[in-house]
Amino acid sequence: MSIFALVRVNKGINELHIIAFTHRNLSVNEIGLLHIDVDNQEVRLKKLKETLQLKELMFLSTCNRVEFLFTTEFEVNSSFLEQFFTELYPTFSQEQIKRYAGIRELHQGMKAVSHQLSVASSLDSMIVGEREIITQVRNAYDASKKMGLSGDFIRIVNRHTIQTAKKVYTETAIARKPVSVVSLAYHRLKDMNVPLDSRILIIGAGVTNTNMGRFLKKHGFTSFNVFNRALSKAEKLAHDLSGTAHSLAELKTFDKGFDVIITCTASESHIISTEIYAQLLQGEKGNKIVIDIAIPQDLSPKIKENNPVTHISVELLQKISNENLKERAKEVIHVEDILNEALTEFEFIHHNRSVEIAMREVPKKVKEIKSTAMNEVFHNELNDVDAESRELIEKIVGYMEKKYMSMPMLMAKEILLKK
């Protein structure tokens, strides 16, 4: 046990806590330091749970969010938090420990449930309405369950959270209009009925183009050539897409033709000059599609003046994104109504479950009373009766046993829930 003292104070719903790090309180790089490799999660999280005597634990990690949902009977104060991060991140300096322990968001009890509902319903996301978070929350719970970290309480929290998020995405339009550059670019291609065997050139192998390429492959596109300044990155993305990798310099000599160019580099000048574009065309005269997500643009403006090009710029996509975000914002009030209703429902669900757990011992006690009566208290008397009478007595006692494990329990449960 650590030098930090653990103080028992919390009971019931107040044992639930969430420690959250998001885009609101940390940079993406700082959040990245909190990620735990999948191969190391089980060992480190089990050790944390054991050392701090946590009852249950769930770990959620996304590109811009790291959260710990746990139950404990101890007070979650500054000493607890410092011990928490010291145990989980042994390579952190004392300065880092204190920073993370001080800058975190901390939610407890019903406020923690409310936070979890907002997270899974995307109201707490960097981009409201991005429904990938519901899958990430579900996967985080499945992982915690598989590792033996979570139990009954986190199970009912997660079940209610997922059910509520599904209702949000079904009954509101919060996620119906895309806002990410990748989603918008894909929908533009889809609206133009671009064939799935179109020849696609991907110029740049950074995060945006990587996501774009994987998105296109997921939706059935099959022909990819990837160009990047660092050939190793081009090779990695090309491997993921079952495509071909090239160095950026090979653009000047590429002779396979193309139908679609997707370009996003960090170059300060135009990567695709009129001369390079002419080489890429290989004499083809039809209209081409260029999705230019770079800032500044990778495509020379002169190309659009002299060639039939459908040019989809990052400025156009951002304009559409802003309009769609406005539409999503109109749905927030409807989502909040659903979450408020779900929060009230959870109070009842939790109370109901607490009563069920509290009354688990009743059937056991009734069976013990029956056994004592039959085998000890009235043992001699029962030995003196005939077999037919004994069978009747056992039927009567068995009938009463069943009734005492149903009707009185139901009545007691109703009384407790009313209280």
Image (cartoon, rainbow, N blue to C red):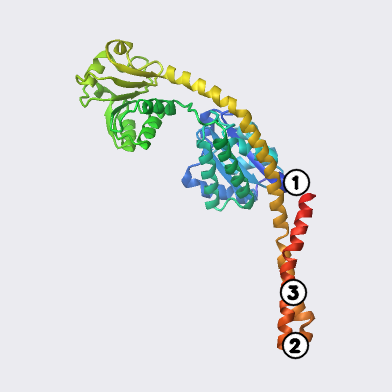
The percent position of residue 298, horizontal first and vertical second, equals: 35, 17
Residue tagged 2: 383
Q: Is residue 332 left or right of residue 321?
A: right
Q: Is residue 264 left or right of residue 118?
A: left
Res 259 visible: yes
Image quarter of residue 409: bottom right
Question: Please, what is the three-letter code of the amino acid marked with disc 2?
Answer: Asn
The percent position of residue 214, horizontal first and vertical second, equals: 38, 34
Label 2: how many residues lie within 10 Å, few (<14), some (14-19) or many (20+)? few
Q: Is residue 6 left or right of residue 149?
A: right
As helix, strand or loop, the secondary structure at mark 2 comes to helix
Image quarter of residue 364: bottom right
The percent position of residue 206, horizontal first and vertical second, equals: 39, 28
Mark positioned earlier in the residue sequence (3 or 2): 3
Residue depicted at x 66% and y 37%: 114
Label 3: how many residues lie within 10 Å, few (<14), some (14-19) or many (20+)? some
As helix, strand or loop, the secondary structure at mark 3 comes to helix
Question: Please, what is the three-letter code of the amino acid marked with disc 1?
Answer: Val
Mark positioned earlier in the residue sequence (1 or 2): 1
Residue tagged 3: 370
Residue tagged 1: 9
Mark positioned earlier in the residue sequence (3 or 1): 1
